[in-house]
Image (cartoon, helix red, strand yellow):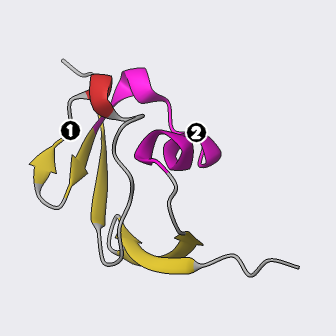
Amino acid sequence: MKNIKKIKIKINGKLSTIQHNITLYSYLKKLKVPLKKVAIELNREIVNKNYLKKIKLKKNDKIEIVHFIGGG
């Protein structure tokens, strides 16, 4: 059986262990993040959502998911 490599990242300040070589898009889908209603920050930089499928997560990456809240 093949050993699946794991890496540690931080998501919204919490440590998480994920599969090595996963894309940011795949990870966000797995978490059921509503992509149209959030902004994604990777290592303190806003990510253009057109590139989510091209970005592979690396050890010690820091992801922040910011939800938009309407109000008046």
Magenta-drawn segment: 23-39
Image spot of residue 26 (x, y percent): 55, 43
Residue 50 in percent (x, y) is at: 30, 22
Kindly identify the residue that appears in the image at 32 percent across and 73 percent down.
13
Residue type for callout 2: Lys
Can the viewer see residue 69 in this picture?
Answer: no
Location of residue 64 by image quarter: bottom left
Quadrant location of the C terminus in the rendered image: top left
Identity of the residue drawn at 29% across and 30% down: 51
Front residue of 68 and 62: 62
Is residue 25 covered in magenta?
A: yes
Disc 1: which residue: 47
Q: Nearer the viewer, residue 45 or 55?
A: 55
Q: Nearer the viewer, residue 12 or 43?
A: 43
Query: What residue type is disc 1 on?
Result: Val
* Residue at horizontal 53 percent and vertical 68 percent from the top: 20
Q: Dots 1 and 2: beta carbons under 8 Å? A: no
Residue 29 has which mark?
Answer: 2
Where, by quadrant of the figure, is residue 3 drawn? bottom right
Neighbour tally class for label 2: few under 14, some 14-19, many 20 plus, Cα within 10 Å: few
The crowding category of the residue bearing disc 1, from other C-alpha atoms within 10 Å (few below 14, some 14 to 19, many at least 20), is some
Q: Secondary structure at mark 2?
A: helix
Q: Secondary structure at mark 1?
A: loop
